[in-house]
Image (cartoon, grey):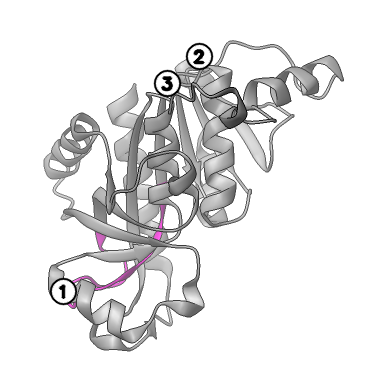
Amino acid sequence: MILSDPDNIPILTPSALLAYRRANGQLPDFPPPHTVIFAPQQSLANYVLRKYSVKQVKGFLGEFYLFRRANGRIALSTNFGIGSPVIGGLTDEFAALGVQQFILIGMAGALQPELTTGSLVISTSAIRGEGVSQHYLPPKRTIDSSPALVQSISHILARQNQPHRPGVTWTTDAPFRELRKDALELQQQGVLAVEMEAAAMLAVARANERAGLAMFAIADQLYGGEWRMASDLHPAQKGLSILFEAAIEMLI
């Protein structure tokens, strides 16, 4: 977002924060990756770190790794917690670093009965039910993933014979305030799932003129206005790894 009024200029900027860390020896100089993959779930991070050779870079919240196979052009950001404020702040920092593209791979709750634990959802757009996006973009109900990235990842998953559903997701800051009336209304509207990060990441990426994509493996169900959690989350964790491998194929 372009802010022309001096009084509307942020006091603290991501660029100033990165410069402070570098000046104090907290952040090394290194060529920025082209793409950052966000992995809020530790199970996905464990899978990735077991399988791929990476180099860790200190200086960011959580853990940040560069993939050797991609010569540092792809990075993994993980172990930073969950929710829109943290992923929004990291997206802003990474954009200031020089990152051009952001991919979120996380878990979500199904709002449609045909989506079961482990089902794959590609967020074509996210309902802005959180607060972060309001600080970055003018008011609007949804924010879109990059259509080109949606098309590319969907093509790869189809070629791999991996069933998946593109569609709208609902981002919220308050998982314990997902009201029954709202869930039922969104279910009727065809919204696929509820999650906690997509709208923020996509909005901050858009505000910085960067591309973004959010995709999810279903972990629990909220359709019909009732919450159901699977006793076995292995299908959801496998779904995360399927989405990650598809993303790597798309990027390399």
Q: Amino acid at mark 1?
A: Glu
Q: Position of residue 74 (x, y in %)?
A: 47, 24
Q: CA distance from mark 3 to mark 1?
A: 35 Å
Q: Position of residue 238 (x, y in %)?
A: 37, 57
Q: Nearer the viewer, residue 50 or 202?
A: 202
Tell me which numbered mark, 1 or 2, is placed earlier along the sequence: 2
In this picture, residue 83 sits left or right of residue 11? left
In the rendered view, tell whether residue 29 sits above or below residue 143.
above
Q: Quarter of the image holding residue 153?
A: top left
Q: Tell me which residue sits at (38%, 49%) in the image.
A: 199
In this picture, residue 60 sits left or right of residue 239? right
Q: Quarter of the image holding residue 141?
A: bottom left
Tell me which numbered mark, 3 or 1, is placed earlier along the sequence: 3
Q: Position of residue 193 (x, y in %)?
A: 29, 65
Viewer-side label of 3, 1: 3
Q: CA distance from mark 1 to mark 2?
A: 40 Å
